[in-house]
Amino acid sequence: MKTSIVYYTQIIVSLIGVFAFWQLAVLIFEIPSYVLPMPTKILTTLFIQKQYLIKHSMVTLVEILLGFGIGSAFGFVLALAISSFRFLEKVLYPLLIFTQVTPKIAVAPLFIIWFGYGLLPKVIITALMSFFPVVVNMVKGLKQVHPDLVSLMSSLSATKKQILYKIRLPSAMPFLFSALKVSITLSVIGAVIGEFVGADKGLGYVIMVANANLETSLVFAALTILCFIGTTLFLIIGVIEKTLFKKYYYQIS
Amino acid sequence: MGEEIRIEGLEFYYAEGETKVLQEVNFTIPSQEFIAIIGPSGCGKTTLLKLIGGLINPIKGRVLIKNTLASQAKKEKIFGFVFQDPTLLPWRSVTDNIKLPQEITRCPTQDYEQLLRLVRLYEFKDKHPHQLSGGMKQRVAIARALSFGPKIMLMDEPFGALDDLTREYLNMELLRIWQNVKNTIIFVTHSIPEAVFLADKVVVLSKKPGTVKEIIDIKLPRPRNIDIKYTPEFNNIIKKLREHLDHEN
Protein backbone atom coordinates (compact mmCIF):
# COMPACT_ATOMS: atom_id res chain seq x y z
CA MET A 1 0.00 0.00 0.00
CA LYS A 2 2.70 2.42 1.00
CA THR A 3 4.75 1.62 -2.10
CA SER A 4 1.77 2.31 -4.37
CA ILE A 5 1.28 5.70 -2.72
CA VAL A 6 4.94 6.49 -3.37
CA TYR A 7 4.55 5.22 -6.95
CA TYR A 8 1.54 7.40 -7.75
CA THR A 9 3.10 10.41 -6.05
CA GLN A 10 6.14 9.98 -8.28
CA ILE A 11 3.98 9.90 -11.40
CA ILE A 12 1.97 12.96 -10.38
CA VAL A 13 5.03 14.95 -9.36
CA SER A 14 6.87 14.17 -12.61
CA LEU A 15 3.80 15.08 -14.67
CA ILE A 16 3.42 18.40 -12.83
CA GLY A 17 7.14 18.94 -13.44
CA VAL A 18 6.78 18.47 -17.18
CA PHE A 19 3.80 20.82 -17.40
CA ALA A 20 5.49 23.45 -15.26
CA PHE A 21 8.55 23.31 -17.51
CA TRP A 22 6.30 23.58 -20.58
CA GLN A 23 4.41 26.55 -19.14
CA LEU A 24 7.64 28.35 -18.20
CA ALA A 25 9.25 27.66 -21.57
CA VAL A 26 6.28 29.16 -23.43
CA LEU A 27 6.34 32.22 -21.12
CA ILE A 28 10.09 32.80 -21.20
CA PHE A 29 10.64 32.26 -24.93
CA GLU A 30 7.38 34.02 -25.80
CA ILE A 31 6.23 31.18 -28.05
CA PRO A 32 3.06 32.24 -29.85
CA SER A 33 -0.08 30.40 -28.81
CA TYR A 34 -0.77 29.04 -32.33
CA VAL A 35 2.62 27.29 -32.26
CA LEU A 36 2.49 25.90 -28.73
CA PRO A 37 -0.23 26.86 -26.29
CA MET A 38 0.46 26.89 -22.55
CA PRO A 39 -0.96 23.97 -20.54
CA THR A 40 -3.22 26.42 -18.69
CA LYS A 41 -4.60 27.62 -22.02
CA ILE A 42 -5.33 24.04 -23.08
CA LEU A 43 -7.11 23.46 -19.77
CA THR A 44 -9.18 26.60 -20.30
CA THR A 45 -10.06 25.48 -23.83
CA LEU A 46 -11.07 22.07 -22.51
CA PHE A 47 -13.36 23.78 -20.05
CA ILE A 48 -14.85 26.42 -22.39
CA GLN A 49 -15.39 24.01 -25.30
CA LYS A 50 -16.66 21.29 -22.98
CA GLN A 51 -20.00 20.69 -24.72
CA TYR A 52 -18.48 20.67 -28.21
CA LEU A 53 -15.63 18.34 -27.21
CA ILE A 54 -17.83 15.88 -25.33
CA LYS A 55 -20.18 15.61 -28.32
CA HIS A 56 -17.33 14.75 -30.69
CA SER A 57 -15.56 12.51 -28.14
CA MET A 58 -18.66 10.35 -27.93
CA VAL A 59 -18.59 9.85 -31.72
CA THR A 60 -14.96 8.78 -31.64
CA LEU A 61 -15.46 6.59 -28.56
CA VAL A 62 -18.27 4.71 -30.29
CA GLU A 63 -16.06 4.17 -33.35
CA ILE A 64 -13.20 2.92 -31.19
CA LEU A 65 -15.34 0.53 -29.17
CA LEU A 66 -17.24 -0.86 -32.16
CA GLY A 67 -14.10 -1.25 -34.25
CA PHE A 68 -12.20 -2.82 -31.36
CA GLY A 69 -15.07 -5.14 -30.48
CA ILE A 70 -15.71 -6.30 -34.02
CA GLY A 71 -12.01 -6.48 -34.86
CA SER A 72 -10.97 -8.51 -31.83
CA ALA A 73 -14.00 -10.81 -32.04
CA PHE A 74 -13.18 -11.43 -35.68
CA GLY A 75 -9.53 -12.01 -34.76
CA PHE A 76 -10.56 -14.47 -32.05
CA VAL A 77 -12.74 -16.52 -34.41
CA LEU A 78 -10.09 -16.43 -37.12
CA ALA A 79 -7.45 -17.66 -34.66
CA LEU A 80 -9.71 -20.54 -33.62
CA ALA A 81 -10.20 -21.49 -37.27
CA ILE A 82 -6.51 -21.21 -38.11
CA SER A 83 -5.40 -23.28 -35.14
CA SER A 84 -8.00 -25.96 -35.86
CA PHE A 85 -7.37 -26.39 -39.58
CA ARG A 86 -3.77 -26.37 -40.66
CA PHE A 87 -4.50 -25.59 -44.32
CA LEU A 88 -6.24 -22.35 -43.30
CA GLU A 89 -2.98 -21.10 -41.85
CA LYS A 90 -1.23 -21.51 -45.18
CA VAL A 91 -4.08 -19.89 -47.09
CA LEU A 92 -4.96 -17.08 -44.72
CA TYR A 93 -1.64 -15.96 -43.27
CA PRO A 94 -0.30 -14.35 -46.47
CA LEU A 95 -3.63 -12.55 -46.88
CA LEU A 96 -3.56 -11.36 -43.28
CA ILE A 97 -0.06 -10.02 -43.61
CA PHE A 98 -1.10 -8.35 -46.84
CA THR A 99 -3.89 -6.48 -45.03
CA GLN A 100 -1.41 -5.34 -42.40
CA VAL A 101 1.39 -4.08 -44.62
CA THR A 102 -1.03 -1.96 -46.60
CA PRO A 103 -0.98 1.46 -44.90
CA LYS A 104 -4.47 2.14 -43.54
CA ILE A 105 -4.12 5.85 -44.18
CA ALA A 106 -3.67 5.03 -47.88
CA VAL A 107 -6.72 2.79 -48.21
CA ALA A 108 -8.94 4.91 -45.96
CA PRO A 109 -10.08 7.18 -48.85
CA LEU A 110 -11.27 4.06 -50.69
CA PHE A 111 -13.45 3.14 -47.74
CA ILE A 112 -14.98 6.61 -47.84
CA ILE A 113 -15.86 6.04 -51.50
CA TRP A 114 -17.28 2.61 -50.80
CA PHE A 115 -19.02 3.13 -47.48
CA GLY A 116 -19.74 6.84 -47.29
CA TYR A 117 -19.00 9.50 -44.72
CA GLY A 118 -20.67 7.91 -41.72
CA LEU A 119 -19.75 5.54 -38.94
CA LEU A 120 -19.15 2.44 -41.07
CA PRO A 121 -15.81 3.25 -42.78
CA LYS A 122 -14.30 4.34 -39.43
CA VAL A 123 -15.39 1.14 -37.75
CA ILE A 124 -13.98 -0.91 -40.61
CA ILE A 125 -10.60 0.82 -40.48
CA THR A 126 -10.47 0.45 -36.69
CA ALA A 127 -11.43 -3.21 -36.90
CA LEU A 128 -8.81 -3.81 -39.60
CA MET A 129 -6.15 -2.40 -37.32
CA SER A 130 -7.23 -4.16 -34.16
CA PHE A 131 -7.88 -7.72 -35.35
CA PHE A 132 -4.33 -8.52 -36.39
CA PRO A 133 -2.58 -8.63 -32.99
CA VAL A 134 -5.44 -10.80 -31.70
CA VAL A 135 -5.07 -13.33 -34.51
CA VAL A 136 -1.29 -13.60 -34.27
CA ASN A 137 -1.17 -13.88 -30.48
CA MET A 138 -4.17 -16.17 -30.12
CA VAL A 139 -2.86 -18.59 -32.74
CA LYS A 140 0.41 -18.73 -30.84
CA GLY A 141 -1.40 -19.22 -27.53
CA LEU A 142 -3.75 -21.88 -28.85
CA LYS A 143 -0.89 -23.84 -30.32
CA GLN A 144 1.40 -23.53 -27.33
CA VAL A 145 0.32 -26.65 -25.52
CA HIS A 146 2.86 -28.99 -23.96
CA PRO A 147 3.25 -32.07 -26.22
CA ASP A 148 3.07 -34.32 -23.14
CA LEU A 149 -0.26 -32.79 -22.24
CA VAL A 150 -1.47 -33.65 -25.74
CA SER A 151 -0.26 -37.23 -25.16
CA LEU A 152 -2.10 -37.31 -21.85
CA MET A 153 -5.32 -36.10 -23.45
CA SER A 154 -4.88 -38.60 -26.27
CA SER A 155 -4.42 -41.45 -23.78
CA LEU A 156 -7.81 -40.45 -22.35
CA SER A 157 -9.29 -40.42 -25.87
CA ALA A 158 -10.19 -36.75 -25.50
CA THR A 159 -12.04 -35.13 -28.37
CA LYS A 160 -10.69 -32.08 -30.22
CA LYS A 161 -13.46 -30.04 -28.65
CA GLN A 162 -12.52 -31.14 -25.13
CA ILE A 163 -8.87 -30.29 -25.75
CA LEU A 164 -9.92 -26.87 -27.04
CA TYR A 165 -12.19 -26.01 -24.10
CA LYS A 166 -10.21 -27.60 -21.28
CA ILE A 167 -6.66 -26.84 -22.40
CA ARG A 168 -6.10 -24.68 -25.45
CA LEU A 169 -8.50 -21.81 -24.74
CA PRO A 170 -7.59 -21.30 -21.07
CA SER A 171 -3.88 -21.49 -21.83
CA ALA A 172 -4.31 -18.90 -24.59
CA MET A 173 -5.89 -16.35 -22.21
CA PRO A 174 -2.67 -14.52 -21.29
CA PHE A 175 -1.89 -14.23 -25.01
CA LEU A 176 -5.36 -12.86 -25.70
CA PHE A 177 -4.97 -10.12 -23.12
CA SER A 178 -1.57 -8.98 -24.35
CA ALA A 179 -3.13 -8.79 -27.80
CA LEU A 180 -6.15 -6.82 -26.59
CA LYS A 181 -3.87 -4.26 -24.97
CA VAL A 182 -2.08 -3.67 -28.27
CA SER A 183 -5.39 -3.69 -30.17
CA ILE A 184 -7.05 -1.05 -28.05
CA THR A 185 -4.25 1.44 -28.63
CA LEU A 186 -4.35 0.69 -32.36
CA SER A 187 -8.12 1.20 -32.31
CA VAL A 188 -7.71 4.80 -31.12
CA ILE A 189 -5.33 5.41 -34.03
CA GLY A 190 -7.69 3.66 -36.47
CA ALA A 191 -10.69 5.76 -35.53
CA VAL A 192 -8.74 9.02 -35.87
CA ILE A 193 -7.32 7.96 -39.25
CA GLY A 194 -10.84 7.27 -40.46
CA GLU A 195 -11.98 10.69 -39.34
CA PHE A 196 -8.99 12.44 -40.87
CA VAL A 197 -9.83 11.17 -44.31
CA GLY A 198 -13.44 12.21 -44.33
CA ALA A 199 -15.80 13.03 -41.49
CA ASP A 200 -18.07 15.72 -40.18
CA LYS A 201 -17.80 14.71 -36.56
CA GLY A 202 -15.43 13.07 -34.10
CA LEU A 203 -12.19 14.19 -32.49
CA GLY A 204 -10.20 13.58 -35.67
CA TYR A 205 -12.52 15.99 -37.43
CA VAL A 206 -12.13 18.50 -34.57
CA ILE A 207 -8.35 18.31 -34.94
CA MET A 208 -8.48 18.82 -38.72
CA VAL A 209 -10.76 21.84 -38.45
CA ALA A 210 -8.94 23.42 -35.52
CA ASN A 211 -5.63 22.92 -37.30
CA ALA A 212 -6.90 24.68 -40.41
CA ASN A 213 -8.09 27.58 -38.25
CA LEU A 214 -4.79 27.71 -36.30
CA GLU A 215 -6.75 27.02 -33.10
CA THR A 216 -3.81 25.09 -31.75
CA SER A 217 -5.08 24.98 -28.20
CA LEU A 218 -8.22 23.18 -29.43
CA VAL A 219 -5.98 20.67 -31.25
CA PHE A 220 -4.19 20.03 -27.98
CA ALA A 221 -7.47 19.78 -26.10
CA ALA A 222 -8.68 17.10 -28.53
CA LEU A 223 -5.34 15.28 -28.26
CA THR A 224 -5.62 15.35 -24.47
CA ILE A 225 -9.02 13.69 -24.67
CA LEU A 226 -7.71 11.06 -27.10
CA CYS A 227 -4.87 10.30 -24.69
CA PHE A 228 -7.36 10.04 -21.86
CA ILE A 229 -9.67 7.69 -23.80
CA GLY A 230 -6.80 5.47 -24.93
CA THR A 231 -5.20 5.23 -21.51
CA THR A 232 -8.50 4.57 -19.76
CA LEU A 233 -9.49 1.77 -22.15
CA PHE A 234 -6.00 0.24 -21.81
CA LEU A 235 -6.26 0.34 -18.03
CA ILE A 236 -9.74 -1.21 -18.08
CA ILE A 237 -8.40 -4.19 -20.04
CA GLY A 238 -5.55 -4.44 -17.54
CA VAL A 239 -8.01 -4.53 -14.64
CA ILE A 240 -10.12 -7.24 -16.32
CA GLU A 241 -6.96 -9.24 -16.95
CA LYS A 242 -5.83 -8.96 -13.36
CA THR A 243 -9.21 -10.01 -11.98
CA LEU A 244 -9.30 -13.03 -14.27
CA PHE A 245 -5.75 -14.02 -13.46
CA LYS A 246 -6.51 -13.76 -9.79
CA LYS A 247 -9.34 -16.21 -10.35
CA TYR A 248 -7.11 -18.47 -12.40
CA TYR A 249 -4.19 -18.06 -9.98
CA TYR A 250 -1.80 -17.37 -12.76
CA GLN A 251 1.50 -15.95 -11.77
CA ILE A 252 1.40 -12.36 -12.85
CA SER A 253 4.85 -11.58 -14.07
CA MET B 1 -1.23 -62.66 -11.51
CA GLY B 2 -0.87 -63.76 -15.11
CA GLU B 3 0.63 -61.93 -18.00
CA GLU B 4 -0.81 -58.58 -18.82
CA ILE B 5 1.27 -57.00 -21.57
CA ARG B 6 2.84 -58.88 -24.45
CA ILE B 7 5.18 -57.09 -26.81
CA GLU B 8 5.85 -58.98 -30.02
CA GLY B 9 8.43 -58.17 -32.70
CA LEU B 10 7.98 -54.46 -32.28
CA GLU B 11 9.57 -52.22 -34.90
CA PHE B 12 9.22 -48.49 -35.22
CA TYR B 13 10.58 -45.53 -37.15
CA TYR B 14 9.17 -42.05 -37.48
CA ALA B 15 9.87 -41.59 -41.19
CA GLU B 16 10.64 -43.97 -44.01
CA GLY B 17 14.37 -44.17 -44.63
CA GLU B 18 15.33 -42.81 -41.23
CA THR B 19 17.15 -44.93 -38.67
CA LYS B 20 14.82 -47.28 -36.91
CA VAL B 21 14.01 -46.26 -33.37
CA LEU B 22 13.07 -49.75 -32.21
CA GLN B 23 13.72 -53.16 -33.74
CA GLU B 24 12.60 -56.65 -32.74
CA VAL B 25 11.47 -55.74 -29.25
CA ASN B 26 9.98 -58.73 -27.46
CA PHE B 27 9.03 -59.12 -23.82
CA THR B 28 6.08 -59.72 -21.57
CA ILE B 29 4.98 -58.00 -18.41
CA PRO B 30 2.93 -59.82 -15.77
CA SER B 31 0.16 -57.83 -14.16
CA GLN B 32 0.85 -55.87 -10.99
CA GLU B 33 4.58 -55.90 -11.70
CA PHE B 34 6.86 -52.91 -11.53
CA ILE B 35 8.98 -52.80 -14.67
CA ALA B 36 11.80 -50.34 -15.24
CA ILE B 37 13.06 -49.66 -18.74
CA ILE B 38 16.59 -48.37 -18.95
CA GLY B 39 18.95 -47.64 -21.80
CA PRO B 40 21.29 -45.06 -23.34
CA SER B 41 19.70 -41.76 -24.26
CA GLY B 42 17.94 -41.75 -27.60
CA CYS B 43 17.40 -45.52 -27.54
CA GLY B 44 13.67 -45.18 -27.95
CA LYS B 45 12.53 -45.58 -24.34
CA THR B 46 9.87 -42.90 -24.69
CA THR B 47 8.77 -44.27 -28.06
CA LEU B 48 8.40 -47.73 -26.52
CA LEU B 49 6.25 -46.26 -23.76
CA LYS B 50 4.03 -44.49 -26.31
CA LEU B 51 3.67 -47.73 -28.27
CA ILE B 52 2.66 -49.63 -25.15
CA GLY B 53 0.15 -46.91 -24.31
CA GLY B 54 -1.31 -47.05 -27.81
CA LEU B 55 -0.51 -43.40 -28.53
CA ILE B 56 1.32 -44.43 -31.69
CA ASN B 57 1.07 -47.58 -33.77
CA PRO B 58 4.01 -49.88 -34.50
CA ILE B 59 5.31 -50.31 -38.05
CA LYS B 60 5.77 -54.03 -37.42
CA GLY B 61 4.80 -56.27 -34.56
CA ARG B 62 2.19 -55.54 -31.92
CA VAL B 63 1.52 -54.71 -28.32
CA LEU B 64 -1.18 -56.79 -26.70
CA ILE B 65 -2.85 -55.89 -23.46
CA LYS B 66 -4.62 -59.04 -22.27
CA ASN B 67 -5.01 -60.11 -25.90
CA THR B 68 -6.30 -56.72 -27.07
CA LEU B 69 -4.23 -54.40 -29.26
CA ALA B 70 -2.89 -51.42 -27.29
CA SER B 71 -4.60 -48.92 -29.58
CA GLN B 72 -7.92 -50.64 -28.82
CA ALA B 73 -7.19 -51.10 -25.13
CA LYS B 74 -6.51 -47.36 -24.88
CA LYS B 75 -10.20 -46.71 -25.42
CA GLU B 76 -10.96 -48.52 -22.17
CA LYS B 77 -8.90 -45.85 -20.36
CA ILE B 78 -6.54 -48.36 -18.81
CA PHE B 79 -3.39 -46.22 -19.14
CA GLY B 80 -2.30 -43.53 -16.71
CA PHE B 81 0.57 -41.38 -17.97
CA VAL B 82 3.13 -39.46 -15.89
CA PHE B 83 5.80 -37.45 -17.68
CA GLN B 84 9.01 -35.73 -16.66
CA ASP B 85 7.19 -32.42 -16.78
CA PRO B 86 4.18 -32.52 -14.44
CA THR B 87 2.09 -30.68 -17.09
CA LEU B 88 -0.48 -29.48 -14.56
CA LEU B 89 -2.97 -26.83 -15.62
CA PRO B 90 -1.93 -23.60 -13.88
CA TRP B 91 -5.48 -22.22 -13.71
CA ARG B 92 -6.79 -25.23 -11.82
CA SER B 93 -6.43 -26.09 -8.16
CA VAL B 94 -4.80 -29.36 -7.12
CA THR B 95 -8.22 -31.00 -6.74
CA ASP B 96 -9.46 -29.71 -10.08
CA ASN B 97 -6.27 -30.86 -11.76
CA ILE B 98 -6.75 -34.45 -10.63
CA LYS B 99 -10.40 -34.29 -11.70
CA LEU B 100 -9.42 -33.54 -15.31
CA PRO B 101 -9.36 -37.19 -16.50
CA GLN B 102 -12.84 -37.72 -15.07
CA GLU B 103 -14.13 -34.67 -16.94
CA ILE B 104 -12.66 -35.99 -20.17
CA THR B 105 -13.64 -39.63 -19.86
CA ARG B 106 -16.88 -39.03 -17.93
CA CYS B 107 -16.02 -42.09 -15.86
CA PRO B 108 -17.57 -42.34 -12.38
CA THR B 109 -16.10 -39.87 -9.90
CA GLN B 110 -13.69 -41.18 -7.30
CA ASP B 111 -12.93 -40.34 -3.73
CA TYR B 112 -10.49 -37.55 -4.61
CA GLU B 113 -9.86 -36.63 -1.00
CA GLN B 114 -8.69 -40.13 -0.28
CA LEU B 115 -6.50 -40.04 -3.37
CA LEU B 116 -4.97 -36.77 -2.19
CA ARG B 117 -4.32 -38.33 1.20
CA LEU B 118 -2.60 -41.22 -0.56
CA VAL B 119 -0.13 -38.85 -2.23
CA ARG B 120 0.04 -36.80 1.02
CA LEU B 121 -1.31 -33.63 -0.55
CA TYR B 122 -4.64 -33.34 1.21
CA GLU B 123 -3.69 -30.08 2.94
CA PHE B 124 -2.78 -28.61 -0.44
CA LYS B 125 -5.98 -29.56 -2.24
CA ASP B 126 -7.04 -25.96 -2.85
CA LYS B 127 -3.61 -24.66 -3.81
CA HIS B 128 -2.61 -23.94 -7.37
CA PRO B 129 0.41 -25.46 -9.14
CA HIS B 130 2.61 -22.38 -8.85
CA GLN B 131 2.29 -22.61 -5.06
CA LEU B 132 3.77 -26.12 -5.00
CA SER B 133 7.34 -27.43 -5.13
CA GLY B 134 8.58 -29.58 -8.00
CA GLY B 135 8.17 -32.79 -6.01
CA MET B 136 4.64 -31.86 -4.96
CA LYS B 137 3.66 -31.08 -8.54
CA GLN B 138 4.87 -34.49 -9.60
CA ARG B 139 2.80 -36.09 -6.83
CA VAL B 140 -0.24 -34.24 -8.18
CA ALA B 141 0.60 -35.63 -11.62
CA ILE B 142 0.73 -39.14 -10.12
CA ALA B 143 -2.61 -38.59 -8.40
CA ARG B 144 -4.06 -37.35 -11.69
CA ALA B 145 -2.79 -40.48 -13.45
CA LEU B 146 -4.35 -42.66 -10.74
CA SER B 147 -7.62 -40.71 -10.59
CA PHE B 148 -9.54 -42.91 -13.01
CA GLY B 149 -8.19 -46.22 -11.74
CA PRO B 150 -5.97 -47.24 -14.67
CA LYS B 151 -4.66 -50.79 -14.66
CA ILE B 152 -1.35 -49.70 -16.12
CA MET B 153 0.77 -46.69 -15.19
CA LEU B 154 3.24 -45.48 -17.80
CA MET B 155 5.88 -43.23 -16.30
CA ASP B 156 8.40 -41.44 -18.51
CA GLU B 157 11.36 -40.32 -16.38
CA PRO B 158 8.92 -38.80 -13.89
CA PHE B 159 11.56 -37.78 -11.37
CA GLY B 160 14.30 -36.93 -13.86
CA ALA B 161 14.09 -33.18 -13.28
CA LEU B 162 14.09 -33.33 -9.48
CA ASP B 163 17.00 -33.04 -7.08
CA ASP B 164 18.45 -36.23 -5.60
CA LEU B 165 16.82 -35.98 -2.18
CA THR B 166 13.37 -35.27 -3.59
CA ARG B 167 13.85 -38.04 -6.09
CA GLU B 168 14.76 -40.52 -3.36
CA TYR B 169 11.75 -39.46 -1.32
CA LEU B 170 9.42 -39.79 -4.30
CA ASN B 171 10.84 -43.22 -5.10
CA MET B 172 9.82 -44.31 -1.61
CA GLU B 173 6.46 -42.63 -2.00
CA LEU B 174 5.85 -44.28 -5.36
CA LEU B 175 6.53 -47.71 -3.89
CA ARG B 176 4.16 -47.00 -1.02
CA ILE B 177 1.44 -45.78 -3.42
CA TRP B 178 1.98 -48.78 -5.67
CA GLN B 179 1.55 -51.16 -2.68
CA ASN B 180 -1.81 -49.48 -2.13
CA VAL B 181 -3.03 -49.35 -5.70
CA LYS B 182 -1.50 -52.61 -6.96
CA ASN B 183 -1.45 -51.82 -10.64
CA THR B 184 1.20 -52.47 -13.27
CA ILE B 185 3.87 -49.81 -13.57
CA ILE B 186 6.21 -49.31 -16.49
CA PHE B 187 8.83 -46.81 -15.47
CA VAL B 188 11.32 -45.33 -17.92
CA THR B 189 14.48 -43.91 -16.38
CA HIS B 190 18.13 -43.38 -17.15
CA SER B 191 19.17 -43.80 -13.54
CA ILE B 192 20.40 -47.32 -12.80
CA PRO B 193 19.99 -47.07 -9.00
CA GLU B 194 16.47 -45.75 -9.41
CA ALA B 195 15.53 -48.63 -11.70
CA VAL B 196 17.00 -51.24 -9.34
CA PHE B 197 15.48 -49.68 -6.25
CA LEU B 198 11.96 -49.56 -7.69
CA ALA B 199 11.49 -52.45 -10.06
CA ASP B 200 10.78 -56.17 -10.04
CA LYS B 201 12.37 -56.40 -13.46
CA VAL B 202 14.71 -54.10 -15.36
CA VAL B 203 14.53 -54.17 -19.14
CA VAL B 204 17.82 -53.00 -20.67
CA LEU B 205 17.52 -51.52 -24.14
CA SER B 206 20.45 -51.26 -26.54
CA LYS B 207 21.22 -48.03 -28.30
CA LYS B 208 19.48 -47.06 -31.53
CA PRO B 209 17.81 -49.03 -33.00
CA GLY B 210 16.63 -50.05 -29.55
CA THR B 211 16.15 -53.70 -28.84
CA VAL B 212 15.93 -55.66 -25.61
CA LYS B 213 19.45 -56.49 -24.55
CA GLU B 214 18.78 -58.03 -21.21
CA ILE B 215 15.98 -58.45 -18.71
CA ILE B 216 17.19 -58.63 -15.16
CA ASP B 217 15.04 -59.82 -12.28
CA ILE B 218 15.53 -57.78 -9.15
CA LYS B 219 15.03 -60.20 -6.30
CA LEU B 220 15.42 -57.68 -3.52
CA PRO B 221 12.88 -58.11 -0.75
CA ARG B 222 9.89 -55.78 -0.41
CA PRO B 223 8.93 -53.43 1.14
CA ARG B 224 12.18 -51.70 0.27
CA ASN B 225 13.63 -48.65 1.93
CA ILE B 226 16.67 -46.48 1.39
CA ASP B 227 18.93 -48.76 3.46
CA ILE B 228 18.73 -51.38 0.75
CA LYS B 229 20.94 -49.15 -1.39
CA TYR B 230 23.88 -49.93 0.89
CA THR B 231 23.59 -53.72 0.65
CA PRO B 232 26.02 -55.76 -1.48
CA GLU B 233 23.11 -57.35 -3.37
CA PHE B 234 21.91 -53.97 -4.52
CA ASN B 235 25.33 -52.91 -5.65
CA ASN B 236 25.99 -56.18 -7.45
CA ILE B 237 22.92 -55.66 -9.57
CA ILE B 238 23.98 -52.09 -10.29
CA LYS B 239 27.40 -53.30 -11.35
CA LYS B 240 25.92 -55.92 -13.63
CA LEU B 241 23.58 -53.40 -15.23
CA ARG B 242 26.32 -50.86 -15.68
CA GLU B 243 28.42 -53.41 -17.55
CA HIS B 244 25.54 -54.04 -19.93
CA LEU B 245 25.13 -50.36 -20.57
CA ASP B 246 28.87 -49.62 -20.81
CA HIS B 247 29.31 -51.99 -23.69
CA GLU B 248 27.02 -49.76 -25.60
CA ASN B 249 28.96 -46.55 -25.30
Image (spheres, grey):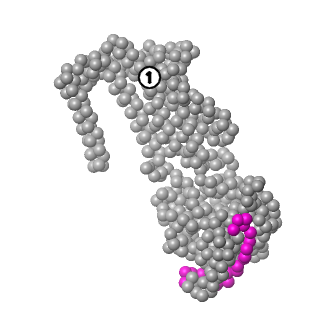
Image quarter of residue B115? bottom right
Image quarter of residue B176? bottom right
Q: Position of residue A141 (x, y in %)?
A: 56, 44
Q: Is residue B6 left or right of residue A115?
A: right
Q: Is residue A230 left or right of residue A43?
A: right
Q: Residue at x 63, y 41 (%)?
A: A83
- The residue to which callout 1 is attached is A192
- Amino acid type assigned to the residue bearing label 1 in the image: Val
The magenta region covers: B207-227
In the foreground, B51 or A237: B51
Q: Position of residue A80 (x, y in %)?
A: 62, 39
User: Does the magenta portion include B226?
Assistant: yes
Q: Residue at x 73, y 59 (%)?
A: B19
Residue A176 visible in the shown view? yes
Kindly report the secondary structure that dominates the magenta region of the rendered protein. Answer: loop
Q: Is residue A242 above or below residue B29?
A: above
Q: Is residue B37 left or right of residue A61?
A: right
Please report, as a chain letter, where disc 1 is located: A
Sort mark 1 into few (<14), some (14-19) or many (20+) by Cα contacts within 10 Å.
Answer: many
Q: Residue at x 44, y 27 (%)?
A: A188
Image quarter of residue B154? bottom right
